[in-house]
């Protein structure tokens, strides 16, 4: 049996990369998500830090997150000519919920439904030997698949780029998209691979000793992005 995945904190590991998936951008464990059947399972965990708590400061408020996602949705529509042939794939855990929010906004703007799914990258990560075992998450592809489509990968935090590299490998197992784009809520820098996001909610310069925590209402009870320092 696989062990529970670590907390969704995006901080450097032994090689300077974020633990867990990056989400997804270093995705954490989940909790019992209220998104309905097919949601990635999320296990109970200690209370998340609150904005203004010791060692943490809020860098994005709920309203700022809402505006960032609205802007990303508009940018996706502009670059894909109204969302023609797009598929949104979220990287578990938080990337999945962000992808669903983007799909909802695209639907509101265009009056059409943007296919949305999830892409587990666990078995394609390059740090499996360095980290505790992780529980596999759900990969769920829309019925029409991804062949010939513009796939927009969605994650919460972009850090070293290694999770996205794993996502590209996982995507190759599913089909051959026409193009692949990347949307992230936060880009914190410190790339170790030549990977760049097409859509960014907030560029957040950070030090390696700092950590970024994304909280979403669907599984954390509130929306926020927090910045803290790695325990010495």
Image: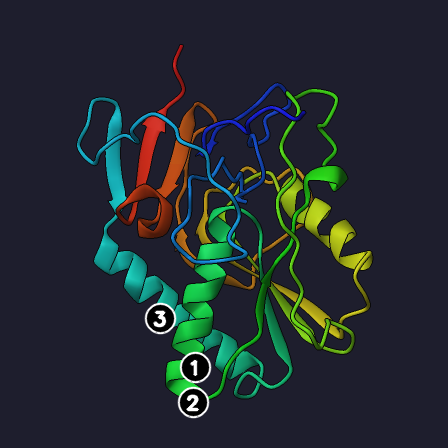
- Binning the other alpha carbons within 10 Å of mark 3 as few (below 14), some (14 to 19) or many (20 upward) gives some
Task: Give the residue drawn at x 55%, y 45%.
Answer: 24
Q: Is residue 10 left or right of residue 60?
A: right
Label 1 secondary element: helix
Query: Residue at position x 21%, y 22% from top?
Result: 54
**Residue located beneath label 1 in the image:** 107
Left or right of residue 173: residue 45? left
Q: Secondary structure at mark 2?
A: loop
> Which disc, if any, is residue 78?
none
Disc number for residue 111: 2
Q: Quadrant of the N terminus?
A: top right
SS under mark 3: helix
The answer to which of 228 and 215 lies nearer the viewer is 215
Residue drawn at x 58%, y 39% is 21
Q: Relative to the observer, which residue lies in front, 214 or 209? A: 214
Query: What's the residue at 46%, 48% (across, down)?
Result: 94
Direction from residue 61 to residue 160 in the image, left or right? right
The 10 Å Cα crowd at callout 1, few under 14, some 14 to 19, many 20 or more, is some
């Amino acid at each position: 049996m696989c062990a529970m995945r670590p907390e969704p904190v995006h901080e450097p590991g032994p090689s300077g990369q974020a633990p867990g998936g990056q989400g997804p951008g270093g995705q954490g464990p989940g909790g019992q998500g209220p998104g309905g059947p097919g949601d990635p399972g999320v296990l109970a965990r200690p209370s998340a830090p609150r904005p203004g708590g010791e060692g943490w400061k809020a860098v994005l408020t709920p309203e700022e997150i809402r505006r960032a996602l609205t802007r990303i949705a508009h940018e996706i529509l502009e670059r894909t000519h109204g969302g023609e042939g797009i598929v949104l794939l979220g990287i578990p855990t938080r990337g999945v919920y962000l992808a669903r929010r983007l799909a909802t906004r695209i639907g509101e703007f265009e009056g059409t439904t943007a296919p949305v799914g999830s892409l587990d990258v666990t078995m394609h990560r390059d740090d499996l030997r360095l980290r505790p075992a992780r529980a596999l998450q759900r990969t769920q592809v829309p019925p029409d698949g991804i062949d010939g489509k513009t796939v927009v990968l969605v994650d919460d935090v972009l850090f070293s780029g290694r999770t996205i590299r794993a996502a590209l490998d996982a995507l190759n197992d599913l089909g051959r998209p026409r193009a692949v784009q990347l949307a992230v809520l936060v880009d914190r820098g410190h790339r170790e691979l030549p990977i760049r996001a097409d859509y960014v909610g907030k560029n957040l310069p950070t030090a390696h000793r700092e950590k970024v925590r994304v909280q979403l209402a669907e599984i954390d009870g509130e929306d926020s992005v927090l910045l803290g320092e790695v325990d010495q």
